[in-house]
Image (cartoon, helix red, strand yellow):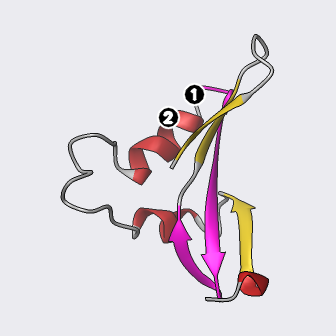
């Protein structure tokens, strides 16, 4: 995979379902909420910003970034 065709886009009305179709491995299922739950959560927690990673126009990742005004860093949950 070439990094030239990779882009990160904020989740929006046109791409949210692409995120919901992504799956985690069986080993991860007990440690992470579904992407649909994470997207819904971001609508009620203003510090959360969900993104979708595209490679060659295909959704391949879902980072859910949490920004905090009390810290000088951001927390990234992928």
- Furthest residue to the front? 2
Q: Which residue lies furthest to the top in this view?
A: 70
The quarter holding residue 31 reads top left
Could you tell me residue 67's position as x and y percent?
71, 28
The answer to whether residue 53 is magenta is yes
- Say which residue label 2 marks: 41
Residue 8, percent across and down? 72, 65
- Name the residue that disc number 1 marks: 44
Relative image position of residue 9 (x, y in whole percent):
73, 63
Main secondary structure found in the magenta portion: strand
51 or 26: nearer the viewer: 26
On the image, which quarter does residue 23 sit in? bottom left
Question: From what the image shows, is residue 3 above or below residue 7?
Answer: below
Is 7 situated left or right of 15 in this image? right
Residue at 51 percent of width and 46 percent of height: 39
* Circle 2 residues within 10 Å: few <14, some 14–19, many ≥20: some
- Is the Cβ of the residue at disc 2 closer than 8 Å to that at disc 1? yes
What residue range appears in magenta?
45-61
Q: 77 left or right of 68?
A: left
The residue that appears at 50% across and 50% down in the rendered structure is 78
Query: Percent x, y for residue 11?
Result: 65, 57
> Is 20 located above or below residue 49 in the figure?
below
**Could you tell me how many numbered marks the image carries?**
2
Q: What element carries label 2?
A: helix
Within 10 angstroms of label 1, few (less than 14), some, or many (20 or more) residues?
few
- Separation of disc 2 and disc 1 at Cα? 5 Å
In the image, 12: left or right of 29? right
Residue 20 lies within the magenta run: no
Disc 1 secondary structure class: loop
């Amino acid at each position: 995979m070439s990094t030239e065709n990779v882009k990160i886009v904020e989740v929006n009305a046109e791409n949210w379902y692409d995120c919901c179709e992504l799956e985690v491995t069986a080993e991860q299922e007990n440690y992470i909420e579904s992407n649909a739950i994470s997207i819904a959560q971001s609508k009620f927690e203003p510090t959360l910003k969900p993104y979708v990673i595209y490679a060659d126009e295909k959704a391949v990742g879902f980072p859910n970034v949490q920004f905090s005004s009390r810290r000088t860093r951001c927390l990234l949950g992928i």
